Image (spheres, helix red, strand yellow):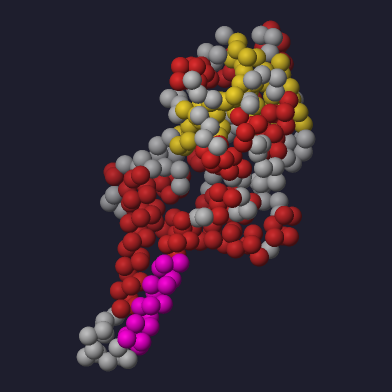
Amino acid sequence: MIKNVSLIIPCQNAAKKLFQLFESIPSWEIIPNEIIVIDSSLDKIFVSKDFELFVKEQNIDFLLIHKKNLFPGHARNIGISKAKNSVLAFLDTSTSPSEDWLSTGLDAMKHQNTDGVWGKTYYQADKFLPKIFRACTFGSSPIKTFPGTIMKKNIFNKCGLFIETARAGEDGDWMSRAELHNINMSTPEKFLKYNELNKIGFKNILKKWFRNYIYGSKLPFFRAHKDYYFYAISFVAVIIAFNWNWILASWDEQSVFYIPNITKISILVIFIIYVYLRGILLPRKKGENLSFIFPINFIFIAIFSAILDVTKILAFGYSKFFKNQTSQMNLT
């Protein structure tokens, strides 16, 4: 069944994944009558004859726009401006929707009388490193994402468009604006599948993490980051512990204020708290099973979380003190 929906797909140097997405569209329960691809690849993508025939036979308006090196938000904004329909759907080339993704989303909008339905994505991980990385970040439960979102076009009149100069995080920034404007969005039943974690190595994970936080650091919703509170409190606690016996007890072991090995104890307590928070509590909240966390994986999760946190802090610091270099970086 064809319905009046504009599907917007940004694509950058991912022709193979885009074609796989195209191949799935004919099997969808509801097919959009307009498909807009914003191709920001270095070389223009050419669509297969089979897909060209399909959109022609189904009377689907297909628009392929090629503009080099656009950031995702800029690409989406172009798609939004070109869309003819009052309802928009968003996908990207790294996620795979189910056959009833669009139909169930439209049904939810109709029956719940909402302005849209958020996307929801399950991050697949089959190997050890991707599973550890997933436990540190996304978790094994599907999470709310902008890819997969279906909404009325007039929402953008209230919330504005995407920030075009951000390489990453622009979708989270827009979602936070939608919440501030109390946009009536519902939670979907169906979710997309993201399989890229299985294809990325340790070095590339850190590179991508560093890049994303460099480009996303200037976005408003990144500024009040909770991690800084933990590290700031930990730093102050160590300073206090290091000077406690000197200031309050004058190194007199007979003083009631003297605490033996206070610095070591403080560092150990901070370490235990961090391992518990990062290695056990947060992964559990994100859907990780205890059978995966224990008996030993919580240690690897905590260590990898610490590496990611340090990478994040370095990215924020770099973007703050080397603004000119950041704007010229090309971290792909």
Q: What span is in magenta?
A: 232-248
Residue 9 position (above or below residue 53):
below
Q: Tell me which residue sits at (64%, 20%) in the image.
A: 86
- Residue 198 x, y percent position in the rendering: 50, 40
Q: Tell me which residue sits at (57%, 25%) in the image.
A: 151
Quadrant (top left, top right, bottom left, bottom right) of the N terminus? top right
**As rendered, which of 11 and 146 lies closer to the eye?**
146
Residue 246 position (above or below residue 300):
below
Q: Is residue 222 left or right of residue 274?
A: right
Q: Tell me which residue sits at (64%, 62%) in the image.
A: 320
Residue 22 inside the magenta-drawn segment: no
Residue 234 inside the magenta-drawn segment: yes
Residue 235 position (above or below residue 105):
below
Is residue 147 among the parts visible in the rendering? Answer: yes
- Residue 165 x, y percent position in the rendering: 70, 46
Q: Tell me which residue sits at (46%, 58%) in the image.
A: 227
User: Where on the picture, by quarter, is residue 315?
Assistant: bottom right
- Residue 267 x, y percent position in the rendering: 35, 71
User: Where on the picture, by quarter, is residue 21?
Assistant: top right
Residue 90 position (above or below residue 69):
above
- Residue 163 x, y percent position in the rendering: 67, 42
| Badge count | 0
Is residue 13 among the parts visible in the rendering? Answer: no
The secondary structure making up most of the magenta span is helix
